[in-house]
């Protein structure tokens, strides 16, 4: 191979490498990842009616305060103490089924909330389906430092099974008392069944 052929080969190889990097760069610009909304804000829609298909990216109401998850988390200032924060996180234990009778699957899940103390409070919420996306409900308190077991939807009823402490047991005791909580979706509100 003479020098002229070698230079042509190197030149063609360099042009191919440049084209490959250019194509990768332009493709990443077209399909780039979206920047998530700041923690505690609504990604789309207004208030509790965020139009999202992701139950980890909509608003729920916990103890009267709207909490909007972004990637399954939210950090808000505490209304009681401006230097403290309330951290809400997606825990999981999802269950899928129709809770409001529209023949579209809804999603029940558990969130945890911690405001800086030793307690970790567990709430069950529902992300129910609408033509505009998922809408989050209010949270129903399950307890402090419980041990969630299963979550299921049967016959338009939500059943959350978990272990808690017996009345009078200290918080240092491991949760061992089995509890089943039955809930229904009434309109847009999650309520305990009577």
Image: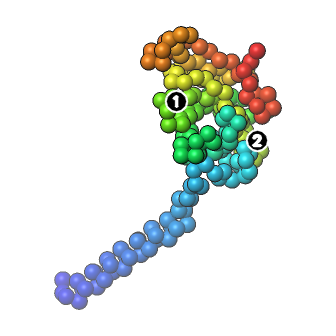
Q: Nearer the viewer, residue 81 or 55?
A: 81
The percent position of residue 70, horizontal first and vertical second, equals 58, 47
Q: What is the distance, in whole Å, between disc 2 and disc 1 at their CAs?
A: 31 Å
Residue underneath mark 2: 130
Residue 67 in which image quadrant: top right
Seen at 50% across and 71% down, the residue is 26
Q: Quadrant of the N terminus?
A: bottom left
Q: Nearer the viewer, residue 189 or 168?
A: 168
Q: Earlier in the sequence, mark 2 or mark 1?
A: 1
Residue furthest out toward the bottom: 4
Q: Are marks 2 and 1 in contact (CB under 8 Å)?
A: no
Q: Is residue 115 above or below residue 15?
A: above
The percent position of residue 18, horizontal first and vertical second, equals 38, 76
Q: Residues within 10 Å of mark 1 (few under 14, many from 20)?
A: some
Q: Nearer the viewer, residue 67 or 13?
A: 67
Seen at 73% across and 28% down, the residue is 190
Residue 9's tag is: none
Q: Nearer the viewer, residue 102 or 182?
A: 182
Viewer can see residue 54: no
Q: Is residue 64 above or below residue 163?
A: below
Q: Nearest to the eye among marks 2 and 1: give it.
A: 1
Residue 120's tag is: 1
Seen at 53% across and 43% down, the residue is 84
Residue 22 in which image quadrant: bottom left
Seen at 55% across and 66% down, the residue is 30
């Amino acid at each position: 191979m003479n020098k002229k052929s070698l230079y042509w080969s190197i030149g063609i190889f360099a042009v191919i490498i440049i084209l490959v990097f250019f194509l990768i760069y332009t493709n990443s610009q077209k399909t780039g990842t979206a920047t998530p909304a700041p923690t505690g804000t609504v990604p789309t829609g207004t208030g509790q009616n965020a139009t999202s298909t992701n139950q980890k990216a909509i608003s729920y109401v916990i103890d009267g305060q709207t909490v909007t998850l972004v990637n399954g988390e939210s950090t808000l200032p505490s209304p009681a103490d401006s230097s403290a924060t309330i951290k809400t996180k997606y825990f999981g234990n999802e269950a899928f089924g129709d809770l409001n009778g529209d023949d579209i699957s809804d999603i029940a899940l558990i969130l945890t909330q911690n405001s800086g103390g030793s307690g970790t409070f567990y709430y069950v919420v529902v992300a129910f389906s609408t033509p505009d996306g998922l809408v989050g409900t209010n949270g129903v308190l399950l307890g402090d430092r419980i041990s969630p077991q299963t979550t299921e939807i049967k016959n338009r009823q939500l059943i959350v099974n978990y272990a808690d402490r017996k009345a009078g047991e200290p918080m240092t005791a491991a949760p061992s008392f089995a509890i089943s909580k039955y809930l229904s979706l009434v309109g847009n509100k999650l309520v305990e069944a009577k």
